[in-house]
Amino acid sequence: MIRVTGVGKRFPGGYEALRDLAFSVEGGRFVALVGPSGCGKSTVLSLIAGLDAPSAGSISVREQPVTGVGDGVGFLFQRDALMPWKTVFDNVAMPLRLRRRPAAEIARRTDDWIARVGLRGFERHYPHQLSGGMRKRVALAQTLVYEPEIILMDEPFSALDVQTRDLMEDELLQLWQGSGKTIVFVTHDLEEAIALADEVIVMTAAPGRVKARYDVTLPRPRVIEEVRADPRFGELYRAMWNDLRSEVLESYARANAVV
Amino acid sequence: MREQTQSFNRWNVIAMQVAVTVGVLALWEIGGRSGFIDKLFFSKPSDIAAQIGDWYRHGYILGDVVTTMSETLAGLVVGSLVGIVLGVLLASNRFLGAVFEPLLVLLNSIPRVTLVPLFILWFGFRFEAKMMSAIVLVLFVVFFATYAGIKDVDPTLVASARILGASRADIVRHVLMPSALTWIFSSLRSAVGFALIGAVVAEYFGANAGVGYRIQYSESNFNTAGVFAGLAILMTLVTFVDLFIRWVQSRLIVWKPTAI
């Protein structure tokens, strides 16, 4: 579904975020990318989304090289990306309106998704009137309403408090299970990665490459609380943390050297 | 929560404002009557009020106000529209912005008053000269606000709109314009003042009607009460237009937290 081949990214300032990165994601899989901060995880997502172009190598989605923002891709941003001047309804309806869908269909699909993320009754609220968790649900509905095959998620829950975060992770799994959608989920949180994903890719410190990959064979459907208690969860966590630790230390050392 | 952090309430503020205004007017009146303030140069509130009453009886006020307001509003509307269109264009197209933004900064450094004689040469004492004078003041205020407002937009919102399927035109409509609208409205409030200045200054240079003409005429007759009466009328006009713009603004920008 997604193939990343020999990708490098150097920004105009000279910073090299990625070098010779290669991995592929099969359709319908939930893949997590973890790595120390600054390792280029988020950059990978904007390259797959077509928001930015790689400096070297190539990326293809559904066997087609990525040349710009494609139609079947969704993106959940780390920061709030709802239009503050649009109500919940108008935000969720926005991708359908941009696709010039018939009004009746827009109303039906928008209402349906607002209900599915548990926000019925909040249609006419503006984002500033909602809590952080509710805003994330709106963003989720806004992405799912146009049914992209691929959803890229850039630490979407990192700004939420721990309880809300667990709830959102469970809801995400419920919405995703059986949908057949492909998810690439960037996080720096190993627990989150293991609990959610089928497969975890550990990246090196910048310039980011693939350091290791793990299959997470924990059974589905999963419930976040229960998954954490599974003995295999602990084994995977220790193995991954072993890989990640040296990269995190290197990333810290480099950050301190720069300062 | 707001009630607790504010140690004064709205009515106290208004009462204080009225008290200060009445106090200053009373001191002025007393000073004028006692001869402490020279009436020839500074007039006094009762004379100014009498002058306004006199103009009203002669039917000058309505005519002057309509003349000045139509020049002001025409200048405001045309100047704002041109400013908004230029701002959107130059802020959303990097090449055009790089070429024209410095030129507009340069043009903005011209003292606009010096252009008025030119407008009078081109258009005579007609409406267009006053409108042009208002336009060249309003245009820059609104342009720079629009330009800054669009440059200020959160890049994440633009990226998000692109992902959701927005074309360039969609981005202008759904992201850039709404984001710039707060900036545009705050600039419109100062633009009203500028439009009025433009119109009145042009009237002052040469006209046969309008509040600016009335002030200039009074001044040439050593009628200081007339000058102040003209100023009082102008202040009243600006206050009403400002209230109107704030009302429109509160209707259009409902998505912001009301704390500000």
Image (cartoon, coloured by chain):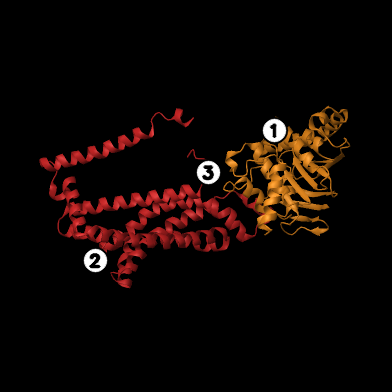
Residue B14, percent across and down?
A: 33, 37
Seen at 72% across and 42% down, the residue is A116
C-alpha distance separating marks 2 and 3: 46 Å
Q: In this view, does B101 lie to the left or right of B159?
A: left
Q: Where is residue B37, by image quadrant?
A: top left
Q: Earlier in the sequence, mark 2 or mark 3?
A: 2
* Residue assigned mark 3: B256
The hue in which chain A appears in the rendered picture of the protein: orange
User: Residue A164, which numbered label?
Assistant: 1
Q: Where is residue A55, by image quadrant?
A: bottom right
Name the amino acid type tagged 3. Answer: Lys
Residue B150, percent across and down?
A: 54, 53
Seen at 81% across and 59% down, the residue is A64
* Residue assigned mark 2: B208
Seen at 52% across and 63% down, the residue is B99
Name the amino acid type tagged 2. Answer: Asn
Q: Is residue B209 left or right of residue B39?
A: right
